[in-house]
Amino acid sequence: MAFDKRMLYEIARQYHELGKTQNEIADSLNISRSQVSRALKQAQDEGIVIINVIPPEFDFSDLEDELCSVFSLDAVVIISGSAGPSKLLTQNLGMAGAKYLDKTLKSGHVIGVSWGATLRELVEALNAIKPNPREVLVIPLLGGQGQASPDLQVNDIASRVSMAFGGSHLYIHAPSFVDTPEARLTMMKDSNIRNVADKWATADVAVMGIGCLVPPSTLLEEGGFPPNELIELEKIGVVGDICMRFFDVHGIPVNTPLEERIIGASLGQLKSIEHVVAVAGGLNKARAILGALRTGVINVLITDDIAARKVLEMAS
């Protein structure tokens, strides 16, 4: 049985505004309860019913100001990191990142993006909030991640960010790291890769996650590193990465055997970008966030209050 909009409105009004049960509505209209249930779903699908979930208000302004002061940041956005599944925190960070981009991106901007679970959730959030169209160009800041899931890959993230804003994007047809330094030099001479790489230092905005070596970690799970290389990274003091550029807890770049094999923006190129936005949270990432902030590359941080307090504690 199909319902017209007038009937859908009446069923929805009785349920949502008058507080009647589905059985009561079914009896009053002489229809089945399952028809009422389908009508309520159809009312949502057609925009007759719009449900807004209002999160509780948290004031982290003092914490944000302290992080800005300690690390000379332009802006900090902090969300609640209260107990819950790590995926929920990643989704909430993605939403905060999406809202920040929607607020700050302007037509004509060139935006560099990295890869990973947080960026994937940021893309999903952009699709949910449906930002106003603007002509932006989105570029990958590094190559692809071997056998990582397709929706974590930098090319997929770049294309989906551009689609969310109605802009355009470029692909980079290369892995994030190759077998030898000689292979990297050869690939960097390719005109298609060079076209993207030339834009790394001239982008207006970069948005990235922060990788860490403490589970749960997309870098560990999907980065494509052999276990012996990960052990070696820990031994030489690596706590995290941004765009596959590794650093220690003091923010000092760590010269690894991978350094000359990476196809991606260097820390120096990232530092020259005016707005570098890092989206990362969770207690497991606190040391990596601290190291990333100390590199001097990041000027906007989006994180949660638990990670933020731990970062400040370790920095003192």
Image: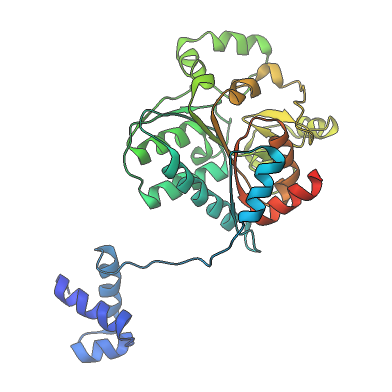
Q: Residue furthest right?
A: 235
x and y percentages locating residue 21 in the rendered image: 33, 87
Of the pair 298 and 118, the residue shown nearer to us: 298
x and y percentages locating residue 107 in the rendered image: 35, 32
Residue 280 in view (yes/no):
yes
Residue 35 in view (yes/no):
no
Specify how the rendered protein is coloured: rainbow
* Image point (58%, 22%), residue name: 272
As drawn, 64 above or below 296: below
For the N terminus, which image quadrant?
A: bottom left
Residue 290, quarter of the rendered image: top right
13 left or right, relative to 194: left
As drawn, 27 above or below 302: below
* Image point (59%, 61%), residue name: 59
Of the pair 157 and 285, the residue shown nearer to us: 285
x and y percentages locating residue 79 in the rendered image: 58, 56
x and y percentages locating residue 163 in the rendered image: 36, 37
* Image point (26%, 64%), residue name: 47
Of the pair 15 and 25, the residue shown nearer to us: 15
As drawn, 189 above or below 158: above
For the image, the number of numbered tags is 0
* Image point (75%, 26%), residue name: 253
